Image (cartoon, grey):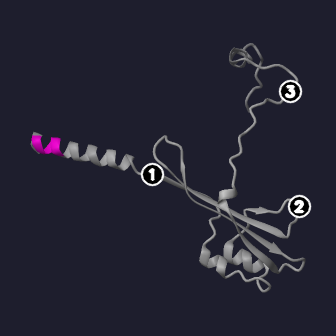
Amino acid sequence: MNLITMRKSLVLLSCLTLLAACEPTIATRGNLVDADKLAEVKIDTSTREDVVNQLGSPTQVGTFDENVWYYFGRRTEQYAFFNPEVMDQKAVEIRFDDQGVVTAVNKLDSAAAHEVDPVTRRTPTYGHDVTFLEQLMGNMGRPTAPRK
């Protein structure tokens, strides 16, 4: 292999590596309900078992009413270290009567979703904070149990 061919191969390999680095990371979290499968869930005829067979387990069961099931899903795309961008987001609420038959299927509006900012306060605890040096030197001089 001569020097020119080797250089061309190296440049080509470098270009392919840089091009592959521009590929986004796509992440799907939750359960993005397929519209065709959701259409198979019929009000007044489908049961809980039918819903589980069609859509899978719910993402969340209602906190105060276990006859309400929620399916939440989100697909994001992220390039390198940039913040992820939401590509698709769906939320579906399915209500059952006491016999387990579907009474309502509601597609929730994702425009009504709100970002939740975590609280920055700290919960006070008893005791003292251990510094890095105390952690590092804490076991020096303590006897260790013999290994068996």
Q: In which quadrant will I find the C terminus?
A: top right
**Nearer the N terminus, badge 2 or badge 1?**
1
From the viewer's perspective, is 11 left or right of 123? left
Q: Residue at x 84, y 78 (%)?
A: 100
- Of mark 2 and mark 3, the one earlier in the sequence is 2
Residue under label 3, please give it.
125
Circle 2/circle 3 CB separation < 8 Å: no
**What stretch of residues is rendered in magenta?**
4-8
Judge whether 45 appears above or below 7 on screen. below
* Residue type at numbered disc 1: Pro
Q: Which residue is mark 2?
A: 64
Name the N-terminal-most of marks 3 and 1.
1
Main SS of the magenta part reads: helix
6 drawn magenta: yes
Question: Which numbered marker is on residue 24?
Answer: 1
Q: Residues within 10 Å of mark 2 (few under 14, many from 20)?
A: few
> Three-letter amino acid code at disc 3?
Thr
